[in-house]
Amino acid sequence: MLQNFWRERKPVTNYANNESTFIFNTLTIIGIGLIGSSLARALKSKPGLVKQIIASDSNKENLAKALELGIADSTCENINDAVSNSDCVILCTPIGTYETIVKKIAHSLPAGCVLSDVGSVKAEPIENIVQYLPSNVHLVPGHPIAGTEKSGPEAGFASLFEGRYWLLTPLENADREAVFKMRRLCEGIGAMVEEMDINYHDKVLAITSHLPHLIAYTIVGTADDLEDQTQADVIRFSASGFRDFTRIAGSNPIMWRDVFLNNREAVLEMLQRFSEDLTLLQRAIRWGEGDVLEALFTRTRDIRRGVIDARQDVPPSPDDTK
Amino acid sequence: MLQNFWRERKPVTNYANNESTFIFNTLTIIGIGLIGSSLARALKSKPGLVKQIIASDSNKENLAKALELGIADSTCENINDAVSNSDCVILCTPIGTYETIVKKIAHSLPAGCVLSDVGSVKAEPIENIVQYLPSNVHLVPGHPIAGTEKSGPEAGFASLFEGRYWLLTPLENADREAVFKMRRLCEGIGAMVEEMDINYHDKVLAITSHLPHLIAYTIVGTADDLEDQTQADVIRFSASGFRDFTRIAGSNPIMWRDVFLNNREAVLEMLQRFSEDLTLLQRAIRWGEGDVLEALFTRTRDIRRGVIDARQDVPPSPDDTK
């Protein structure tokens, strides 16, 4: 089957000699959901970064929508055709699909091609795919810290990454030129790029993202188990805190299932710490220890101030588009 | 000391014979923080609801600010003077202050005066104060399901209650005319009023508000215990979920301490359910049970849709002011 891919492959362009000022000539986005379609829109809104964008997706409706919205120059159902003439391929699918996809496309990727992704967990998923990649394909794992709870190509918007962090977690032997290209690409669409150790990334994200989502899903599930009338009232009176949790718990189920399955150790460690802290508060409530509660509630205000100072307090919105 | 209060009391106006169309002639707001100042602003923005507003606060700076902002007609440091000529008094202070305040003002309240509050817990705090009230003072406990994480008189805004629920939890022997007046007042500033059993209120709020706040405070505290570099990165990369928790955990510490101390049983019950559900997910992550995770993450989406359908998905903002 792999031989077919070789026969189908188009001649490799020598990008080094290409006088184009584009960072990439042909960038293929695999998975045209919220992040993939936002990336396509962002690149379209900044001409000069890439020459053309190909969208590939296992869902034909998504591809049709991408063309209709004009966010890709072309679409390609056959994933191998899609990547075979690309100098950059970015995986924007749930982490659980990486291995299947990369196993399939590995030998269709042209020499010198940069392969990146946008997944929220890096170590395990990247370790799983690196074995399939030819040495002349440059892997630069990435993760934009941006998103909304919505899913699908219609949910994307061009300004999603503006002023947001885009973390790159290159492996030790990474091609520096490829990392530099990815940095330029992300910065070109307004993101702030940081390079980070791949394991450290997963630890930080476990507390900033994965645990908050797990907790939000849990509390919304707890509410869902209440008797019908109470549940209806929980929804009606959700403005008092619960609302924010429902928003987080409205995120893509498959994507989040894969996150937890792939960042098990870090999530379980943070969850253990959280549970201990929660038990302490539970005890303080039971025994009426107001000073314990007040001390924590005062301490946490400083973290909030830090978030505001870092200008990360406002969620992205399609309305930000200038 | 109580005799002093009697001597200081002004003649009681017979509101029943007053031809004014105002719901209340003199409404005193005790505690001019986020909710108190928003209530004052909302009433000021709808002339015809109350004739004059008196602000009282133990913090002199808050009173000066209230006058400067023009949100009260007068301010009064002496709380007994403030209420002695009022036909409506609304407590907008932390729940833990209720008993002290009501014990102090009980005999300065004119006959026929309506006493209300805006606290997030009702049963225990109301039970604590009801014993001090003369039978000719009409207690109508209330709770607007609206707020932001900010505190203080500057943080308030006139549109805070527009399109939001304002729950009233009158006791069985409540004066229906007083309840009706409070309903008209709240509806007059754009709120949707619902009457609710006082114990049921505390149960619903335990899951919609108190538990989410407790969890948010906990996870932000857990992050605060991480080593310095990690903590700095948690703040920088907070946009991926953690941000929403820091917002909730930036709320007034004293107010929230009092909430947990006063709704102990309901909070502990919901916390117990939550912990069991979280343990189930923890186990699913440990054993790689993707189907358990996916099933929950899919189920919780329906609740989110319910919140959106109930139009409670957008937080209030000062920008809403028309």
Image (tube, coloured by chain):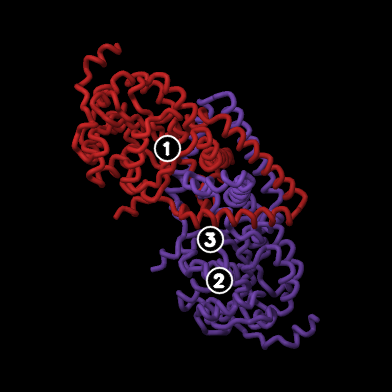
Chain colours: A purple, B red
Three-letter amino acid code at disc 1? Answer: Leu
Amino acid type at mark 2: Pro
Q: Can you give x and y, in whole percent of width and height, for residue B8 in the image?
A: 22, 17
Q: Which residue is mark 3?
A: A147
Q: Nearer the viewer, mark 1 or mark 2?
A: 1
Chain under callout 3: A
Circle 1 sits in a helix, a strand or a loop, which is it? strand
Nearer to me, A43 or A154: A154
Using residue B246 as the reference point, say whether residue A319 is left or right of it. Answer: left
Residue B53 in percent (x, y) is at: 24, 35
**Which residue occupies the foreground of this view, B307 or A71?**
B307
- Where residue A142 sits in the image (x, y, percent)? 60, 63
Q: Is residue A72 above or below residue B21?
A: below
Q: Is residue B172 above or below residue A208?
A: above
Q: Which residue is mark 2?
A: A153
Say whether residue A231 is left or right of residue B47.
right
On-image quarter of the N terminus of chain B: top left
At 61% from the left and 78% from the top, the residue drawn is: A87
Left or right of residue A85, residue A317 in this image: left
Q: What label sits on residue A187 in the rendered view?
A: none
Disc 1 designates what residue?
Answer: B168
Label 3: few (<14), some or many (≥20) within 10 Å? many
**Identity of the amino acid at label 3?**
Gly
